[in-house]
Image (tube, rainbow, N blue to C red):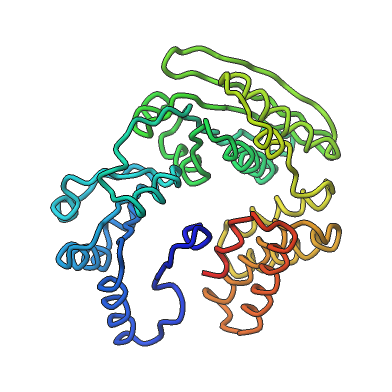
Amino acid sequence: RLRADGIEVWIDQKGIVGAEQWATEIVEGIQGCTTFLLLISGDSVQSENVLKELSLASETRKRILPVDIYPTELPTSFMYPLAGLQRVPFAEFDRILHAHKHGVEKIIKKDERKSLMILPFEDLSPTGDNAWFADGIVSELISALSNVKSIRIADNQATKEFKRYKGQLTTYAREMNYRYFVQGEVRKFGDQIKISSRLLDIETGDHLWQDSMKGIMDNIFDIQEKVAEKVVEGLKVHLASDEKKKLAERGTENAEAYELYLKAREYFSRQTKEGIRLAVQLLTEAIHLDPGYAQAHQFKALALANLYHRYDREPVLLDEAENLCKEALRLKPDLLSVYVPLS
């Protein structure tokens, strides 16, 4: 997304082979940068290498922009180089762009948008094996509502982090600085589906709306659109004409291709070689059913790139991933996630 906005990005993710070259290129990358983007998570703040890189950026007086993947307590070793710097939530991407262009000190301003998080939907299917479907519904709702400018919506990672809080919603809301939450349950049995959802205002304790919608898989897009519309209505948000259009936008009209796409997300999330390969197979089937499904092209490219970097160093995988990304961009030029497999 940074690259899509015309910003040159260097990341030690590709093309570094030997240890000596690795260290040299990282030093050169930090010394030559304008902004040092520090992604903060439980893992990164425990990394000695990240601390070394932060220290070098601080010593060479680089502009440091700390970005929270999720709220994390900083160890004392990180406190000095980050003293006085405001940390930006990863979900507030516009503020990251603004901070890079205009300076970190200028991003301290009140955010007037409605803060919203879609919590993980519970799978209440009779078979109990449709969590992949429930997770997919949440991801699609987040994607749709992220197009509404007056809503500050948490991303998928923040949503997944809620599971660590074991249902302590008020504590989580306070720490994450979100006021509105959508909870829901999904029941799926064969072709029959039922989605129940509700919008909560943590500050007042009110249920702003609650509803259940039934249908078959062929109706899934209409149901998802109605849930998104209910959220917007509950938040009393006015939509511009282009936002209404984006809220109703669908990656595909083929319910079978969509179901394969959601299953592929589940297998991919396991990050095993077999899981990623199964994801590729399912996405290949989805593209066969709907050759115009841009998101399926992008996701298959991401799976192939992961397969290359983690398991099979076969150049043909990257070649195919690049071709899939080009096709995804041709089909949907504003699909920013297409740049992830190419990074």
Q: Is residue 309 left or right of residue 60?
A: right
Q: Quadrant of residue 334?
A: bottom right
Q: Which residue lies most toward the front here?
A: 102
Q: Residue at x 57, y 64 (%)?
A: 339
Count the numbered circles shown: 0
Q: Nearer the viewer, residue 56 or 2?
A: 2
Please determine whether, in this image, residue 172 is positioned above or below residue 38: above
In this rendering, the answer to whether 114 lies above or below 23 is above
- Residue at x 46%, y 13% (from the top left corner): 205
Q: Residue 110, located in which quarter of the rendered image?
A: top left
Q: Tell me if residue 281 comes above or below residue 121 in the rendering.
A: below
**312 to the left or right of 37:** right
Residue 184 found in image quarter: top right
Q: Does residue 204 appear to the left or right of 23 in the view shown?
A: right
**Residue 337: x, y in percent?**
59, 57
Left or right side of 3 for 232: right
At x 69%, y 43%, the residue is 133
Residue 25 position, x and y percent, is: 32, 80
Q: Position of residue 117 (x, y in %)?
A: 51, 33
